[in-house]
Every structure is written in C-alpha cells, then in structure tokens.
C-alpha cells in the first residue's frame, strides 16, 4: 500500500512496518478486549480498574511519559503525554475503555469477552466502541516512535472509563486541568465511516435535554359510572396538553424554541445531498410506509441530523393491567426529550418548554414539570483547518475524500472538551455502520485497522508546522 502525505513523501515504509506487526498488534487488542470493563455494573468495578492499568502500562511501554491513572469516585481517568517537539502543535487524543453490558448473552455467536476473528472482522464487546478505535491511536504513536524515534507533533492522551454511564467525573477533570490538557486540537475516534471504503468526518452532534411532566386532578382515581362526564380525566388532559407542543406541520410549537437555530449553508446542503441517503431503504428496513415525522418543510436527512426535535418518549396513567377497570385516573405522566442543534442552550430550552406546559395546562388540573439531563450540541465548521487536514489524511490512505455528516445523536463530552479547552474537536471515526455497537456480536472490520493507524499518522504529519 502506497501512502503519501501532503509533501508527497512516501509512507510505504510505515505501511510495511504495520503489515509486519499486524498479527502482534491484533493479539494485543485481543488482550484488551478480554477485560470485561463494564462500567455500569458494580460487579465489574475491578475489571474496569484492570483495563485502566492495562492501558496505562501499554502507554508506558510504547514511550509515552507522565502516565497517570487518576482515581475518581467512579472509574479511573488515564493521562499520558509526549512533549518533545518545539514549535509543533499538540494533539489531545480522547477515548474510553469502558464498554456496554452484553445482554442478551444468548444472541452472541461467540462469547463477548473471547475475541474471535471471522470474515476479517474481530468480534467482541468493545471492538468498535471504543477499545478498537482507541487502540488505533496507541498503535499510531507506537509505530511512529519505533520507526522514526520521534513524533511529528506533541501528543497527550485523556482516556476515561465512564463514557457508557454519561462521563460523570470527566467534565470536572477537564475544568480543573485546563493547563495540563492544553492543546491545539482534540481528536476522537468513537464514530463511524459512511460505508466500506468511504471515510466520513462527523462535524456536528446534536445536544440533549430531558423533562418529565406530571398532571393531577382529583385526590384519587374515581368510579367512571359515578363521576364520568362530570370530572376531568387526567389522561385526557395530558393528551390535550402534549398535543399543544407541535403544530400540524410538525414544527415545535413552543415560543422561542427556534430562536438560536442556525440554518444550513448551501455547501452543507450539498454535502448532505451527496450522502445519497436512500429513503426507500430506510422505510423498508423499518417496516414503514412513509417518513413524515418532524418538520414538513425540511428533507428527511435534514430532520434527523440538523434540525431540533421534541419527542414524547413515554406516557402513563390510569389502569394498565389485564382486563378492564372503569376508573377515571387522577394523574398522568409523560417523559419528554429534545435533540438540539448548534447554538441552542439545553437549559434555556428546558425553561421554555416548562413555561409552555404551565401556560397551556388545561383548567382543572395541577401540573409539575421536573427538569432532567442536559447535554450541549457541538459543531466544528467544515472549513476548519483541522477538519481539512483530517480530510486530507483520509484521502492519503483511503484514496477517497471523506463525506461530511451531521450526527443526529449526542455525545455531550465532545462539547465539554470544546468548551473547557477552547479548541476544535475532530471526530475521525473508523468503525462501519452495522458493527453492532451496544448490541450482540459487536465487531470491528480489520481492513480499517492498519488503514486507521496510517490515517492517524498522516494526520499528525499534516498538522506539523
């Protein structure tokens, strides 16, 4: 494989080095994947600690310095650095070594913590989310240090063990260690490519906010024969109230909800069209006859990635058991979440929705709105120099320019890095769609193993001043 950087220098020697060491590198990845570092389950607390120690030892062995395992009230954060390039930029690599639970176990073709290679893929929990992708960065640093004796840039690692449970301790660590973590760019590989052989740069993530509303009428459930037609039904009132949140065109009907939304540029719209999202395939895969949710004035691709949403995630009230119970329920409840886009402020949106619910509450009821989780949206402009260097690195290795995509989901820690360190964040993913992250038979395509390492090495070379 011939790889070239922007100066036309041949990277074939590095590619040959990786090819020679691929079996060794894959075996080391298997060691990490065998550790059941499930952060959400207390019985695996020691396993999470073992994974942290394993990575710290690996970082020391490849030549990283100042390696620390920082204990928190939860699971450890790992820090390491190599800072010997004067007048060169500093890259901070973020990743996580904790993994999702493995249930349902019976759907795994092979045990989740016994890494197995089938069809040029490595199957194990954490293979693509995020141990496999994090390991690419460790191997990129090791390969450069072993083949050249130095790195083209300064590199820091910040690796956590709580991403799968919401990163409760990392934001404070970022705020308290701004100088220690100072850098020119944060690089994260915890996302996917667009398709096999088609790299992608995710430049935007939606934010998140959640609320719960409870509505009460009488002081108890009532007999529908004695009181039906005369008193308010909490379920009816809740449906009426929730219906006020959207208009007939799917637009969120909350005052000032869209005030801070920035419309897509023409270039972004062109990039979105270039993705060629096949709506017919989407409908077929979901068993749907149409895709008409959300705002009618926007395309399906825009609605699921670059527009804010307000969704009713759950509703309950009254009798829900088997058979019939003729009651008029005195309380009803609903859970609401919003996906938010760049410039929208989650806490501001929560307050706007709370105000709307209180103002539109039907007569004859009392409502209570509780504000819950939030996560900030994130966007790095496509024309950011670091984004363009990442695109060039993908081109060098894959022979194809990446597509640029907005992700409809949320990774709040990305925004935390951006805000705490005030630097661009580049999401360089090497997973593929359909690799079953969070599901049974999670896997990572090995064709992206060496290519991923080479792409990271190329990016380091390209951003060198």
Image (cartoon, helix red, strand yellow):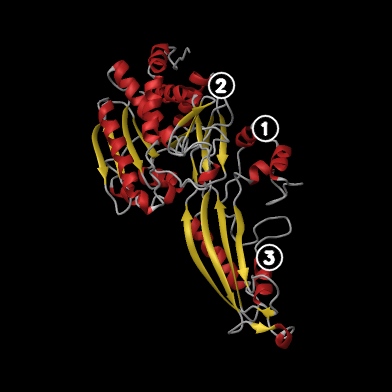
Asked whether 275 or 452 is in front, the reply is: 452
Decide: few, some or many residues near mark 3? Use Cα within 10 Å; few <14, some 14-19, many ≥20.
few
**Can residue 255 be seen at all in this image of the molecule?**
no
Q: Residue 166, percent across and down?
A: 43, 51
Residue beneath the point at 38% across and 26% down: 27
**In the image, is 65 to the left or to the right of 272?**
left
Q: Which mark is residue 243?
A: 3
Residue beneath the point at 36% across and 23% down: 464
Residue under pointer 1: 276
* Residue placed furthest toward the left: 66
Q: Residue 311, percent across and down?
A: 61, 57
Q: Alpha carbon of mark 3 to alpha carbon of mark 1: how far? A: 34 Å
Residue under pointer 2: 400
Under circle 3, the secondary element is helix
Q: Alpha carbon of mark 2 to alpha carbon of mark 3: how far? A: 47 Å
Tell me whether the residue at label 2 lies in contact with that at label 3, contact meaning CB atoms closer than 8 angstroms.
no
Q: Which of the two discs, 3 and 1, labels the residue nearer the N terminus?
A: 3
């Amino acid at each position: 494989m011939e790889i070239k950087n922007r100066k036309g220098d041949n990277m074939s020697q590095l590619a040959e080095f990786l090819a020679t060491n691929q079996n060794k590198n894959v075996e080391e990845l298997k060691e990490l994947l065998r550790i059941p570092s499930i952060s959400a389950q207390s019985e695996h607390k020691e396993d999470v600690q073992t994974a942290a120690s394993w990575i710290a030892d690996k970082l020391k062995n490849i030549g990283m310095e100042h390696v620390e395992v920082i204990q928190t009230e939860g699971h450890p954060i790992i820090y390491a650095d190599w800072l010997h390039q004067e007048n060169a930029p500093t890259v901070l690599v973020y990743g996580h070594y904790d993994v999702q639970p493995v249930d349902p176990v019976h759907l795994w073709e092979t045990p989740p913590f016994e890494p197995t290679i089938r069809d040029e893929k490595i199957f194990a929990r954490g293979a693509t989310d995020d141990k496999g992708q994090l390991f690419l960065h460790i191997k990129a640093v090791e390969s450069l240090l072993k083949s050249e004796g130095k790195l083209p840039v300064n590199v820091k690692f910040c690796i956590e063990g709580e991403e799968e449970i919401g990163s409760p301790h990392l934001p404070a660590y970022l705020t308290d260690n701004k100088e220690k973590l100072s850098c020119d760019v944060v690089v994260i590989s915890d996302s996917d490519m667009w398709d096999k052989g088609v790299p992608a740069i995710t430049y935007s993530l939606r934010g998140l906010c959640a609320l719960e509303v409870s509505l009460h009428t009488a002081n108890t459930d009532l007999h529908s024969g004695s009181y039906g037609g005369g008193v308010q039904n909490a379920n009816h009132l809740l449906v009426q109230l929730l219906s006020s949140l959207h208009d007939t065109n799917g637009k969120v009907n909350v005052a000032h909800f869209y005030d801070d939304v920035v419309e897509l540029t023409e270039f972004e719209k062109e990039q979105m069209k270039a993705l060629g999202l096949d709506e017919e395939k989407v409908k077929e895969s979901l068993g749907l006859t149409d895709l008409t949710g959300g705002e009618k004035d926007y395309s399906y691709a825009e609605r699921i990635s670059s527009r804010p949403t307000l969704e009713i995630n759950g509703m309950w009230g009254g009798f829900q058991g088997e058979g019939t119970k003729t009651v008029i329920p005195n309380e009803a409840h609903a859970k609401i979440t919003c996906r938010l886009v760049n410039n929208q402020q989650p806490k501001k949106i929560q307050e706007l929705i709370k105000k709307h619910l209180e103002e539109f509450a039907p007569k004859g009821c009392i409502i209570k709105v509780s504000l819950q989780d939030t996560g900030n949206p994130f966007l790095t402009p496509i024309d950011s120099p670091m984004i363009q260097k990442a695109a060039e690195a993908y081109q060098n290795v894959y022979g194809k320019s990446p597509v640029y995509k907005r992700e409809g989901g949320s990774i709040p820690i990305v925004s935390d890095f951006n805000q705490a360190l005030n630097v661009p964040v580049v999401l360089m993913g090497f997973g593929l769609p359909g690799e079953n992250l969070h599901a049974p038979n999670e896997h990572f395509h090995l064709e992206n193993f060496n290519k991923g390492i080479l792409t990271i090495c190329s990016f380091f070379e390209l951003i060198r001043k």
